């Protein structure tokens, strides 16, 4: 073939390739614009939460109370629930410990716990992207997969709360990244093991997906010895730490983090959340399943990380069926969908038309996610708009001459220098399971020992009080207390006049 003919064919090839590159560039730009809008919603939600000084969620109060107790060098895992305070610490201690230095510096507040959650959410996205890049060397795929996470409505809702989940997830993803980036270094795997253990001691449910994915991926890369070392080190460290904490607390650690979490399970809650996920992110779910079933396993390093992590995140997601659970059980699945999405885009690198189509579909999906995120944003806005009324509740708590019983706004107690006396949901579940005798508390209500009792009755969940208070408690409140105020969906009860 003459040199001129070769140049002519090469020019023709480049001419045919150029429109594909332009199309791919346009698709990528559309996707980045959509993801940029979703990130703006994420940031706006977070900034609004940081500026709000009062509780945004039932679970924020107990965690702040635990941080205060740890800052005062008191235990948070009581083994004897027969005497007050009737409190439970459902999670391992790392998140309250992370807040303890802030308690010393600034006193009790919610902003630093929320800041930890926001930064942890950003860290999850970062480590998903870095892990994808280490696996695929595809920057577009890594960026696309990473930015899925902050666009998920579950993440938008939960990242603005001072809760344990996102810190634990960030630690688990840091561990996964270290494993993928330096799989043959013993010191790196030891560090990864520490990160995975730290994730478990932030939230117990992170004991499955990330450790399993790291172990399977190392085996698939021919690193059997390193896989066994990682499993032995992380598993051994976790068990030793559990034994030490349980011994030091006289069995309180097991009671609080295991027994107290065995709540009733309702499949209708699973069905409702599964339907919500199908409506919110159908393309992500379809893409993830397609990647699992169709992507080659031998030539694709990503598959051996995506598959175990995605599959193992499903049992955690199913725990959303527990009474009292929320969308925090879907955070690990959200990260898994971002990982699978990035891996699918990298898989189609040699098919530019298919890759362009996938990116355009992903842009459409991200816009739909941003629209879905308006629901959690609306819920947070609803609470923030009641700021003046919540401030009045805070003053009622501060002025009360004695212990205050409350549910959704328990966080007002540590904010006002008071310890939580009673956690309604946790203790009610233990009472129903026969693990706690409620009679002393019921008797105290009957004897009107509490100057104020506050019960949350929002218009969108009026029956939630039945999960938080036993019938006996509600009966005695009705018999011996009368409603005096209705503020921020909280009915304030005071002892009846003699």
Image (spheres, rainbow, N blue to C red):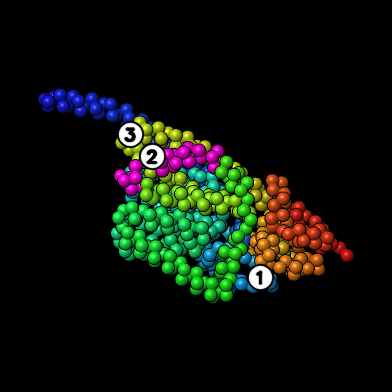
Q: Is residue 186 magenta?
A: no
Q: Quadrant of residue 433?
A: bottom right
Residues drawn in magenta: 276-302
Look at 44% across and 63% down and name the residue there: 197
- The mark found on residue 393 in the picture is none
Majority secondary structure of magenta residues: helix
Q: Is residue 289 magenta?
A: yes
Please tell me how crowded label 3 is: few (under 14), some (14-19), or many (20+) other residues with Cα within 10 Å. few
Task: Locate residue 245 relative to residue 431 in the image: left or right.
Answer: left
Task: Locate residue 115 relative to residue 186 in the image: left or right.
Answer: right
User: Which residue is label 1 attached to?
Assistant: 81
- Give the distance between the C-alpha atoms of the residues marked 3 and 1, in whole angstroms: 62 Å
Question: What percent of the width, then of the height, locates residue 422?
Answer: 68, 65
Question: What percent of the width, then of the height, locates residue 228?
Answer: 36, 62
- Give the distance between the C-alpha atoms of the residues marked 2 and 3, in whole angstroms: 15 Å
Look at 53% across and 75% down and name the residue there: 247
Element class at badge 2:
helix
Element class at badge 3:
loop
- Position of the N terminus by quadrant: top left
- The mark found on residue 294 in the picture is 2
- Look at the image and tell me whether residue 249 can be seen: yes
Q: Earlier in the sequence, mark 3 or mark 1?
A: 1
104 up-or-down from 366: above or below: below
Q: Quadrant of residue 96?
A: bottom right
User: Which residue is label 3 attached to?
Assistant: 351
- Position of the C terminus by quadrant: bottom right
The residue lying toward the viewer, choosing from 24 and 187, is: 187
């Amino acid at each position: 073939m003459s040199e001129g003919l070769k140049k002519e064919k090469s020019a023709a090839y480049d001419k045919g390739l150029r429109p594909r590159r332009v199309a791919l560039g346009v698709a990528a730009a559309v996707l980045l614009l959509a993801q940029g809008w979703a990130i703006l919603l994420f940031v706006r939600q977070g900034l609004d939460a940081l500026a709000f000084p009062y509780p945004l969620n039932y679970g924020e109060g107990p965690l702040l109370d635990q941080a205060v107790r740890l800052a005062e060098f008191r235990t948070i895992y009581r083994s004897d629930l027969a005497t007050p305070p009737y409190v439970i610490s459902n999670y391992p201690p790392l998140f309250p410990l992370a807040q303890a230095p802030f308690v010393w510096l600034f006193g009790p507040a919610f902003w630093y716990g929320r800041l930890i959650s926001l930064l942890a959410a950003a860290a999850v996205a970062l480590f998903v992207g870095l892990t994808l890049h280490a696996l695929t060397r595809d920057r577009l795929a890594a960026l696309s997969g990473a930015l899925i996470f902050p666009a998920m409505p579950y993440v938008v809702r939960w990242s603005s709360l001072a809760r344990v989940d996102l810190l634990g997830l960030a630690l688990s993803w840091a561990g996964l990244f270290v494993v993928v980036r330096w799989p043959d270094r013993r010191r790196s795997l030891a560090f990864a093991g520490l990160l995975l253990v730290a994730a478990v001691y932030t939230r117990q449910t992170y004991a499955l997906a990330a450790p399993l994915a790291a172990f399977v991926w190392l085996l698939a890369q021919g690193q059997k010895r390193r896989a066994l070392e990682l499993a032995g080190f992380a598993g051994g460290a976790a068990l030793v730490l559990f034994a030490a904490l349980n011994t030091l607390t006289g069995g309180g650690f097991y009671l609080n983090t295991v027994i107290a979490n065995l709540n009733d399970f309702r499949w209708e809650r699973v069905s409702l959340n599964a339907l919500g996920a199908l409506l919110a992110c159908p393309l992500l779910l379809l893409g993830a399943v397609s990647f699992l079933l169709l992507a080659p396993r031998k030539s694709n390093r990503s598959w051996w990380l995506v598959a175990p992590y995605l599959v193992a995140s499903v049992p955690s997601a199913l725990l959303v069926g527990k009474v009292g659970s929320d969308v925090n059980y879907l955070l690990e699945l959200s990260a898994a969908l971002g990982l699978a999405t990035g891996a699918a885009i990298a898989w189609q690198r040699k098919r530019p038309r298919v890759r362009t189509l996938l990116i355009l579909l992903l842009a459409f999906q991200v816009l739909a996610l941003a629209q879905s995120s308006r629901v959690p944003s609306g819920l947070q806005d609803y609470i923030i708009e009641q700021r003046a009324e919540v401030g009045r509740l805070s003053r009622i708590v501060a002025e009360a001459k004695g212990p205050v019983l409350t549910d959704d706004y328990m966080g007002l107690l540590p904010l006002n220098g008071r310890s939580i006396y009673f956690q309604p949901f946790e203790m009610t579940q233990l009472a129903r399971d026969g693990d706690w005798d409620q009679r002393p508390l019921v008797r105290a209500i009957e004897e009107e020992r509490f100057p104020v009792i506050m019960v949350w009755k929002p218009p969108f969940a009026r029956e939630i009080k039945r999960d938080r208070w036993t019938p006996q408690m509600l009966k005695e409140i009705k018999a011996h207390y009368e409603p005096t105020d209705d503020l921020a969906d909280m009915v304030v009860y005071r002892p009846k006049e003699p």
